[in-house]
């Protein structure tokens, strides 16, 4: 009996390992395709000619990017010149917790695009931050530090220029704050972000 169980375990393990190896390449390819699609949503593919996915560095900035973990910054270039960057940032003060964003910023400091990658906000109230439910997230396009002025980087209820949602101010307020901090991070680190060797890890900011 013991021998039969051992043989069954060995065969099962072998089958699982074989299946893993057979599907690993496909899974990796699908993950890379999804990442590329997401990056192109916040940094138009027509604006750069480098291999965006491979031109990246790792940074740490808990105060401005909302994460204690290293954050990958993808760099877009055209003819070798900086076009922009894309990276994740977390708004920790959503109504139901963290809101993870992907933010693209042109080299001149303008927002190229913002998308919500994940959140736990209340369905029907907080989820209009998703592009699939509302164009609200597009209101960041073209904005920069100074446009609008610093005191207007807020929802209208707080004296800013960004709309809030009926019955849900906390969620858009959190996203606006996170995008502004991401711009502050970019402004403080612009030269270093583009000049650092690919795959290098940069010190905390």
Image: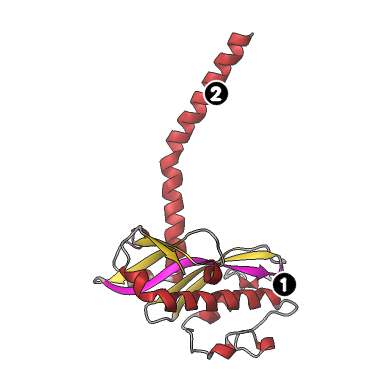
To which quarter of the image does residue 110 belong? Answer: bottom left
Q: Residue at x 57, y 70 (%)?
A: 131
Is residue 111 shown to the viewer in this render? yes
Image coordinates of residue 144 in percent, x first then y, are 47, 84
Asked if residue 43 is positioned above or below residue 7 in the image, the reply reads below
Asked if residue 105 is positioned above or below residue 122 in the image, the reply reads below
Q: Residue at x 52, y 80 (%)?
A: 140
To which quarter of the image does residue 12 belong? Answer: top right
Image coordinates of residue 23 in percent, x first then y, are 45, 38
Residue at far left of view: 79
- The colouring scheme, among rainbow, by chain, secondary structure or one colour, is secondary structure
Image coordinates of residue 134 in percent, x first then y, are 61, 74
Asked if residue 12 is positioned above or below residue 84 in the image, the reply reads above
Q: Nearer the viewer, residue 107 or 37?
A: 107
Q: Nearer the viewer, residue 191 or 96?
A: 191
Q: Which residue is mark 2?
A: 12
Residue 31: say if magenta. Answer: no
Q: Residue at x 63, y 74 (%)?
A: 174
Q: Nearer the viewer, residue 26 or 96?
A: 96
Magenta region, residue range? 81-95
Asked if residue 105 is positioned above or below residue 59 in the image, the reply reads below
Q: Earlier in the sequence, mark 2 or mark 1?
A: 2
Please state if 95 lies on the left or on the right of 112 as rendered: right
Image coordinates of residue 141 in percent, x first then y, are 49, 80
- Say what secondary structure mark 1 lies in: loop
Q: Which residue is mark 1?
A: 125
Disc 1 crowd rating (10 Å Cα; few below 14, some 14-19, many 20+) is: some
Residue 87: say if magenta. Answer: yes
* Quarter of the N terminus within the rendering: top right
């Amino acid at each position: 009996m013991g021998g039969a169980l051992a043989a069954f375990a060995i065969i099962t393990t072998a089958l699982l390992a074989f299946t893993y190896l057979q599907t690993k390449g496909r899974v990796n390819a699908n993950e890379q395709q999804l990442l590329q699609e997401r990056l192109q949503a916040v940094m138009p593919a027509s604006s750069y000619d480098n291999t965006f996915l491979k031109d990246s560095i790792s940074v740490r900035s808990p105060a401005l990017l909302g994460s204690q973990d290293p954050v990958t910054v993808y760099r877009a270039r055209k003819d070798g010149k900086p076009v922009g960057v894309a990276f994740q940032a977390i708004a920790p003060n959503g109504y139901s917790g963290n809101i993870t964003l992907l933010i693209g910023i042109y080299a001149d400091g303008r927002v190229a695009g913002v998308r919500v990658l994940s959140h736990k906000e209340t369905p029907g109230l907080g989820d209009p931050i998703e592009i699939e439910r509302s164009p609200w997230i597009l209101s960041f396009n073209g904005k920069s530090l100074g446009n609008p002025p610093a005191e207007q980087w807020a929802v209208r209820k707080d004296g800013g220029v960004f709309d809030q949602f009926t019955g849900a101010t906390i969620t858009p307020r959190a996203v606006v704050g996170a995008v502004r901090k991401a711009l502050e991070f970019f402004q403080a680190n612009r030269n270093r972000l583009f000049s650092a060797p690919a795959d290098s890890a940069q010190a905390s900011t």
